[in-house]
Image (cartoon, rainbow, N blue to C red):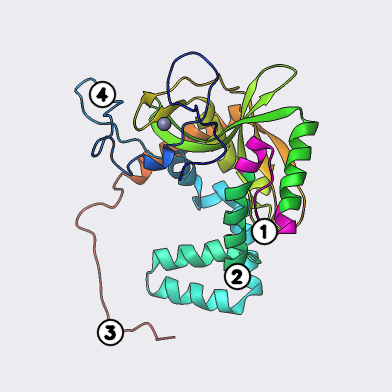
Amino acid sequence: MPSPAFPPDSSCTWGPGPIHGCQHGADVPRNQWGQGNLRIDPTDATGKLYALPRVSTLAGQLDNKGGLIKWAQANAVRGLAVSRALRDRAIVAVNAGDDEGLKAVVAEAESKGGSTEAADRGTALHAVVMPALITGQDPDVDDPAMLDSIQAARKALAEAELTPLLMEQFSVNIQAGYCGTYDLLVKHQPTGKHYVTDVKTSAKLNDRNYPHKVAIQLACYARATRWCPYRGLLRSPEIDRIKGFLLSLPIDQGKAYLDPINLELGWEGLQLAQAARSFGKTKPLGANGIHIETDTKVPAL
Ligand SMILES: [Zn+2]
């Protein structure tokens, strides 16, 4: 859906002049490049289409891996401890060998207090906040809490002398092997530096309390070039690789937290995430294992 946030003369080009946002990020084919009438670009030396993993997928490689995310695990345990229903569901999932079901329970436990309704509100806020920040105009919503959040976000950015320039730009880094869409690109008026910014809208400040995944994602975007599925690579402002920002807007609180994020640490995290991804594709289970079955049945719950 074309956003009213972009001026009518917006074009997706590499050429000189003011940089307007590319609005075609949603048209990038999933898991495959260059489908249909899309320009097949970039391709590798043999003309083969690149298939790049999403930054969010890469950063997610560090989720639920042993002690790497102690905070999230502790949170999940707390959630399971206070909710009999969640604990029962977790036990059922474990006994059934239902990994996906268990993941869902853990995710729910981690964000305990985050209902489906809260998740929907977070998504709605996310959808209205970026155009509102770029255009400076309030969205046409009859929702005082959302307008308060937008107001708080504007104040935080203004205090940091950051001007939002571009939103939701699909970017690629072929050499490092990833792609993804960042939320916001802001310009620091006193220095002219550009910073990539992640906008989080949820009931809880999970990403602020455990910003490692955000740091990885921002570090990736800071090293990526904008790419349009119709025009190919697009000229992009040089983005600072040392620092990014996390803008947290907890829903219905009228609050904004603008935190600098260390992208050098984030880049280190990406190396870990890529190593974890490679390791996840190995096959440590050897051949000819021994498997004994007895008549004992797991009692039904
Ligand atoms: Zn475009």
Mark 1 Cα within 10 Å, few/some/many (few <14, many 20+)? Answer: many
Residue 250 higher or lower than 164, as above or below: below
Q: Position of residue 104 (x, y in %)?
A: 48, 65
Q: Quadrant of the C terminus?
A: bottom left
Q: Position of residue 174 (x, y in %)?
A: 37, 26
> Label 2 belongs to which residue?
80
* Gap between marks 2 and 3 measured at Cα: 32 Å
> Label 4 belongs to which residue?
44
Find out whether residue 143 is within the magenta segment. yes
Q: Are marks 3 and 1 in contact (CB under 8 Å)?
A: no
Dot 2 lies on which element? helix
Q: Are marks 2 and 3 in contact (CB under 8 Å)?
A: no
Dot 3 lies on which element? loop
Residue drawn at the location 66% of the way across and 56% of the way down: 141
First in residue order: circle 4 vs circle 2: 4
Q: Position of residue 137 (x, y in %)?
A: 68, 41
- The type of residue carrying mark 1 is Ala
> Label 1 belongs to which residue?
203
* Gap between marks 3 and 4 measured at Cα: 56 Å
* Gap between marks 4 and 2 measured at Cα: 48 Å
Q: Which residues are magenta?
A: 130-146
